[in-house]
Image (cartoon, rainbow, N blue to C red):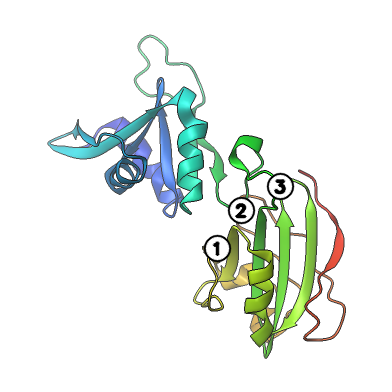
């Protein structure tokens, strides 16, 4: 038998299986199960446990006022973190308050100055492999810079090395070029428009925290690895 709080946590966690879930409980963000073991190891904090029904589950938490410092350390290690907040005050006699994830923080979607490296771009890139070619788009969410290009497939690794993105979106089941150090975020193939037809002229990652990238209008010859700036996106 489980508790209403445990059921609420598990329901929210199911929606964010690839992120560490910071679950707000009063003045703390708590993590449970494997997430608790991960942050206890990576942040060097105490791992405890909490009774849930007839069992105990791993538990590790951080004070809510220290979120940014701990978040920066996890993001620097390539983790993704879902921030789940209490959406209402706990009232007398209320057993369970509403909670929602208000933001998913990933290495490529940082906007906070204290989480960014001063003087360097923080790119979120998307690579759409095609037939002997690849579509490549990248955005710095913190500045609004957005660009795209088309490259020969064998040139994709060099272009990604030049950009050094913090995070790379790829169609699920696709391997990144050799040497890529970015955090990888696989997306379902439908998120990459027309890639299945071998065309790299449009790229629309649709299920990522920054939302949908604008349609990429391809110009230039295959093998031209100089990106064309197409404008800025709102931040």
Is the residue marked by circle 2 packed among few (<14), some (14-19), or many (20+) residues within 10 Å? Answer: many
- Identify the residue under disc 2: 108
Nearest to N terminus: mark 1 or mark 2: 2
Cβ atoms at labels 2 and 3 below 8 Å apart: no
Name the outermost residue toward the left.
Answer: 54
Q: Which residue is mark 1?
A: 182
Give the left or right position of residue 146, taking residue 211 as reference. right
- Residue sitting at the far front: 119
Q: Earlier in the sequence, mark 3 or mark 1?
A: 3
Closer to the camera in the image, 102 or 5? 102
Q: Say if 72 sits above or below 220 in the image.
A: above
Label 1 close to label 2 by CB (< 8 Å): yes
**Alpha-carbon distance for marks 3 and 1?**
19 Å
Look at 48% across and 23% down and name the residue there.
65
Indicate which disc residue 119 carries: 3
Dot 2 or dot 3: first in sequence order is 2
């Amino acid at each position: 038998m489980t508790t209403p709080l445990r059921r609420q946590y598990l329901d929210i966690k199911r929606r964010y299986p690839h992120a560490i879930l910071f679950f707000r409980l009063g003045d703390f963000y708590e993590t449970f199960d494997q997430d608790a073991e991960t942050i206890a190891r990576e942040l060097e904090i105490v791992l405890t446990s909490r009774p849930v029904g007839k069992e105990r589950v791993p538990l590790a938490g951080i004070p809510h006022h220290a979120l940014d410092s701990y978040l920066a350390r996890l993001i620097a290690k390539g983790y993704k973190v879902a921030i789940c907040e209490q959406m209402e005050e706990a009232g007398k006699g209320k057993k369970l308050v509403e909670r929602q994830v208000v933001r998913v923080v990933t290495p490529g979607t940082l906007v906070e100055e204290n989480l960014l490296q001063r003087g360097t771009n923080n790119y979120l890139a998307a690579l759409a492999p095609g037939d002997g070619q690849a579509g490549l788009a990248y955005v710095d969410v913190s500045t609004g810079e957005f660009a795209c290009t088309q490259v020969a497939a064998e040139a994709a690794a060099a272009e990604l090395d030049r950009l050094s993105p913090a995070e790379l979106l790829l169609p699920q089941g696709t391997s990144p070029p050799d040497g890529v150090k970015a955090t990888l975020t696989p997306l379902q193939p439908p998120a990459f428009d027309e890639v299945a037809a071998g065309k790299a002229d449009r790229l629309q990652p649709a299920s990522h925290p920054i939302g949908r990238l604008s349609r990429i209008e391809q110009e230039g010859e295959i093998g031209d690895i100089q990106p064309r700036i197409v404008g800025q996106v709102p931040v």
